[in-house]
Image: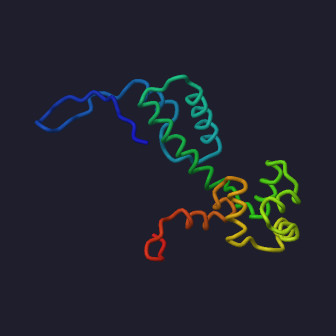
Amino acid sequence: MAVKSRRRVTRGKKGSGRTNSMPQAYLSLLTRFRLKPITSHEELAEATALARELDNRAHLSPEEQEYVEVLAGLVEAYEDEHFPIPDVSAGDMLRFLIDQRGVTQQALSRETGIANSTITALLKGDREMTRGHIEIFARYFRISPSVFLPGDKRLEASRPRVAGKVE
């Protein structure tokens, strides 16, 4: 999302703009937490606390909004590296969705047309989901089919295909 800046610009030579001053709100945020890669759990805690504080404010200036977006990206990068979230198996995802919907396995079988024994095998991990299973479950639960795919497959599925190749 592009955010417009409200910096004051003074004119030097024709056509060149110089930034005269940086907004005070932005400078005060920089003194609290400098925008740089996070390298420790302590910095992560500081950055997270500041991001929460800014998120709880009723209104942010455009500069504060820019700052919090960059800060959130730095937090996310650190967490992705140090606390990766493992992929969930298709069977575990199916179990979660069944629990969330509050349906029984038998009702799911009846309503999707997938044999109860097949659903049992999918839930146990004794059988892999086919494309057909994924499409049926995605329609039934009103979700993207990609939730049943591991992370690398989700990325592939989201890329546009041209002439049979992934771009």
Residue at horizontal 60%, vertical 63%?
154
99 or 137: nearer the viewer: 137
Image quarter for residue 112? bottom right
Left or right of 102 in this view: 157: left
Up the image or down, 167 lies above or below 71; here it is below
User: Residue 9 vs residue 38: left or right?
Assistant: left
Residue furthest out toward the left:
14
Assign the N terminus to one quadrant of the image: top left
Expressed as whole percent of the image width and height from the top left, the position of residue 79 reads 63, 50
- Asked whether, in this view, residue 133 is left or right of residue 122, the answer is left
Report the residue at 24% width, 29% height from top.
9
Above or below for 7 versus 99: above
Q: Quarter-wise, where is residue 108 in the image?
A: bottom right
In this rendering, is residue 148 above or below 67?
below
Rendered residue at 69%/70% (across/down): 132
Q: Position of residue 100 (x, y in %)?
A: 80, 48
Relative height, residue 51 to residue 128 (above, below): above
Camera-side residue of 161 and 59: 161
Residue 146 position within the rendered picture, expressed as x and y whole percent measured from the top left? 63, 61
Q: How is the image coloured?
A: rainbow
Count of numbered tags: 0
**Residue at 15 percent of width and 33 percent of height:** 12
Which image quadrant is residue 139 in?
Answer: bottom right
State which quarter of the image contains the C terminus: bottom left
Is residue 65 or residue 40 the one in the foreground? 65
Q: Position of residue 129 (x, y in %)?
A: 74, 70
